[in-house]
Structures are given as structure tokens and as C-alpha cells.
Image: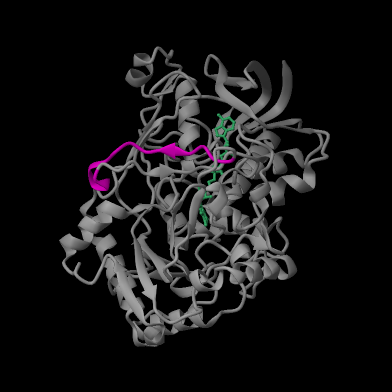
Amino acid sequence: MQTYDYIVVGAGSAGAVVANRLSANPNNKVLLLEAGHASHPWGRIPIGFAKLINNPKANWLYTAEPEANTNGRQLPVPRGKMLGGSSAINGMAFVRGQAQDFDTWAQMGNQGWSYEHVLPFFKRMERYEGGGDDTFRGREGPLRVTNPEPRDPLYAALIEAAGQVGIAHNPDYNGANQDGIAMSQATIASGRRMSTAACYLDPIRKRPNLHIETRALTRAVTLDGQRCTGVRYSVGGNERRAMATREVVICAGSINSPQLLELSGIGQPERLRALGIEVRQALPGVGENLRDHFAPRTRWRIGAKGYTFNDRARGLGLVAQALRYALTGKGMLGMVAAPMRAFVRSRDGLEAPDLLLGWVPMFTEPGRKGPKLSRESGVTCYAHPMRPESKGHIHIVSSDPTRQPAINFNFLSSPVDAALTVRAVRIARSVMTAPALGFLKVTEMAPGTSQTGDDEILDWVKRTAETTYHPVGTCKMGADGMAVVDSRLRVHGIAGLRVADASIMPTLTSGNTNAPSIMIGEKAADMVLQDAASGRG
Ligand SMILES: Cc1cc2nc3c(=O)[nH]c(=O)nc-3n(C[C@H](O)[C@H](O)[C@H](O)COP(=O)(O)OP(=O)(O)OC[C@H]3O[C@@H](n4cnc5c(N)ncnc54)[C@H](O)[C@@H]3O)c2cc1C
């Protein structure tokens, strides 16, 4: 059995950051355990997004339970399974969220998480290569963030169309305020995906005090009374143990972090006992408070030729795209999954946007190995509320760590979410039918022009919407009875154990969740080091 100062479980968006920052001090001996492989050939190329979304070699490929408001459909829940975690398979859009998101967390009693307190970590993590205001943007961090290639006629027209329905252009939605339409900022640089594996682990692989073990499935944390002492994990069927003299930090993501706590006897007593697991700490909130974005994809056929990738990447066009990528790192193979987005308000008088629209300049359809380009030319626009009220849960159904937990989203269980989703679809419609897009010869394919009433639109949402892959909240930070970790991310009632990843978010941030997960990793590492220095760790 090996002994370390710190053991980090999961090398994803947050875990890679924690391992990097903790091992920066050569006196800290750090073990980073990752269940997946070290890398995948498609993991560094942006278009690899489409190749990894269904790929068991890099993806846990979870499936949610059937739900009333998904018409019984079982939604796919992809999650990255390799160094970099979901940052190695995600859509690469870089969105921090709103100042109000973090101020809300602070108002819920989480000291140190207001926007003022998290901004330095957002700045520390990034090397933003666009313009913007240095008050808000970091220039020297490990994570390269760029603006996509200059606008082409389609994007320029979308910005004009949005303007015609009252949505202004905002060149930096990660700056002073989020409002408006913009090209998506991206964790892509020099044509390569900037996962946390690339930005936080590759540069430090040679640190002698950091041991990275891949294909290592952590099965449970080990406890001595109410103190965490280490982990049990398996590699290739062999069970191993490792000890942590200071702390274990669980960064296994919103599905696997609550799973790991439950497997370790930390969670809802009745549920654990029913599975034959000894209860070590009763925490009713473990696995609860699951939130995600439930997003219908509106579809728009484009009659004018040459504006979408359905036209541009067919036959010789695909060869041209491949050549372009090889020479410049740009084009369809080097782009962020949804290159344009708008943060909008469902009604006047709101303090900040509450809806997100995202545009993809093509139609895709399911193929044998993942999504493929359709023959028909079109634009897809997803539209959804950013801070849904509906809450679900994730719980183990077996004491076997290789069995996937049951995922219940409970989408649209809040009538507010249902109303806002319909509103978001209507706003997508208003942009796509604005005069500036007339030259594109746009036809609404979905939901379809016959779907005019709220009930009809909602029915279509239930039949077709999917998540945008942003599960959070299942090890909620807070001080109330359903909180799992405190504001320093320490598991309530257990010493030497923290959770640091998207699962600690008490509410969903206004946008995509990679940037806030990386921020959580940065802030967690800072707190671990501070607590060690002050003797509190
Ligand atoms: C397909 C997809 C597209 C997305 N698109 C975007 C986007 O464009 N922009 C954006 O901001 N966000 C996007 N997201 C969301 C974002 O990537 C995630 O919210 C974020 O990566 C979560 O970070 P995390 O650290 O919580 O978990 P993860 O990054 O998922 O890391 C968890 C890690 O723990 C490992 N692990 C789990 N269990 C164990 C275990 N028992 N033992 C050892 N290791 C374990 C996993 O293999 C994984 O590497 C997307 C996500 C997906 C899946």
C-alpha cells in the first residue's frame, strides 16, 4: 500500500486542476486516480466531439431513467472517461456564468463564493487570447481560451437578425455582463482542444511528487471512524489501497461523486442499508438536487446554397475542410460545437438573462458511430432556461461500483421551467424569421409552423428535447440539512474528505459548466493548501 499526502479521485475538469495545484509544492506527494484511459486519438481534435459522444473508450455513456416529461424516453448522459474528464469530450464552449450565480451561492450561506471571491480564480485559470477588459479576463493562466474565427456571412446575419428582435451584440459575455448574442468563446487554441489534461496535466507530467494512475476505478473511500484515511481502487481487476495522510479530494463529477460517497457508506441511511452498505455518515442530500439543462433543438432548413456545413463539407468540400484544418487549424474540424450563442431575457424587467440560445451551423442525424452530417442543409438552434427549478436525483442501485447509478432528472417538474422553455423556443423562432435572414430562404422544420400553441410546443419539447450535458448539484455545498459539503468543500461529518467538482454547485450556473467546474478546482486547491498551512486541513 502506498501513502500520499493527497489523493485526488477523477482527473476531469476540476480534478486535473486540483492535482496540478497541490503537486506544485514538491513536498506534497499526490496521487491522481482516473478510471479512464490516458488519452484518445480524437481527444485533441475539436471535431472529435462528434466521435467521442458515443464512444465507450472515452465516455461513461450513462442512460437516464424514463421520465414522464420525456415521454418515457431514456436520455443519453455522456460523461468524459479519460484524463481531462468531460473537458476532453465536451463542446468546448467557454462560459463562466453570471456574477449573480455566484452571489446567490454566497447568499445561500456559502462564504467565499460570491462573484467578487470567485473572479480571481476565473482569471487565474485562463489565458484569454481575445480582447476584453483585464478587470474580468485572465491572460496568464494554463487554460487557453480563444475567440472563434472571424464571422462568416451566416454568423453576421444571425447577429443582425438578433438585433432586429432586440438582442444586442456582446463581444465578451464573460466580461462585465452576459447579455446579448456573440460568437462562442472556446477552449480551443492552435486547432487543438484545450482540455484540462492538455492544459493542467501535460505540462507537469514529470513532477516526481505526482503519480497519475489511469484505468484505476476508485471503489470507495476508506474511513477510520469519522476520518477519511484513503481509497480502495481497482486496476485491471486487481484491488489496491492507497493512504492519504492529509486528505482525499473526490472530483469524480456529478454522477460518480455521489455514487462514490454512497458506496463508502455516506448518504441516505435507508437507501444504503437496503443495499447492504454499512452507514458511516448519514447525509440525506447525497445524490439529491440534480439539475441540468433540458434543451429542445429547433431546426431550420436553409434553402440558399453554401452557408451551412451540410453544403460546405460534402464531397470535395470535406477534403477542403480537412486541408483547411491541417493548414490553419480552422473550419469545421477545428470549431466549437455551437459557435454562436445568445443570452436573453424571457421578459422585460429581469436583472439578468434567464434563457440561452445556441446555434449549430448544420443539420446532423444519428449515425452508426455517432452524429453525422445530414444531406439536407440547415441550422439547429437549441433554446432553454438557464437556471431550471426542476430537481432530480442520482442514487446507486447496487453496491457494485461498476453498475451505473439510477439518474432521474425530473425535467419540467416545475411549471416555471415548462413556461420558460416554450418562451425560449418562441424567441429562437423570432430570430430565425427576422428579415436579416430572408436571403437564406429559411423554413422551420421543428417544431414546425403548425405548432403554434404553448401546449403544442411543450408537447414537442417533451417528445424531442435532450440535455446539454450539464448535470450539477448532487453533492450540494451549504449548511442546510440537504448540504453534502460545507463552503470549504469538506464533507459534513467526515474529516479529511472533500468533494470538488460540478456536483458541489448548489444551483446551476447561467450557461455551460466547464469553466465553473475548473474554477471550483482552482478554488478547492487553494482552500486545501490554506487549510494545511493553518493546521485546519
Ligand atoms: C458531451 C458533453 C458536452 C459538453 N459541452 C460543454 C461545453 O461546450 N461547454 C461547457 O462549459 N461544458 C460542457 N459540458 C459540461 C462540462 O464539460 C462539465 O460540466 C465539466 O467537465 C464537469 O467537470 P467535473 O470535474 O465535474 O467532472 P468531469 O470532467 O466529468 O470529471 C470526472 C472525472 O472523474 C473520473 N471518474 C469518475 N468516477 C471515477 C472513479 N470511481 N474512479 C476514478 N475516476 C473516476 C471520470 O472518468 C472523469 O475523468 C459538456 C459535457 C459533455 C459530457
**Residue shown at the point (49%, 33%) measured from the top left:** 256
The reply to whether the magenta stretch includes residue 67 is yes
Q: Which quadrant of the rendered structure holds the C terminus?
A: top right
Instruction: Residue 433 in the image: state x and y as whole percent.
Output: 32, 80
Depicted 391 relative to depicted 46: above or below: above
If the image is split into quadrants, where does the N terminus sit? top right
Q: In the image, residue 29 lies at what x, y percent? A: 76, 30
**Which image quarter: residue 483?**
top left
Residue at x 62% of width, y 18% of height: 237
The relative height of residue 496 versus residue 350 in the rendered view (above or below) is above
Q: Nearer the viewer, residue 240 or 77?
A: 77
459 or 281: nearer the viewer: 459
Ligand 1 visible in quadrant? top right
Principal SS element in the magenta part? loop
* Residue 82: percent from left, percent from top: 62, 39
Q: What's the magenta region?
A: 58-71
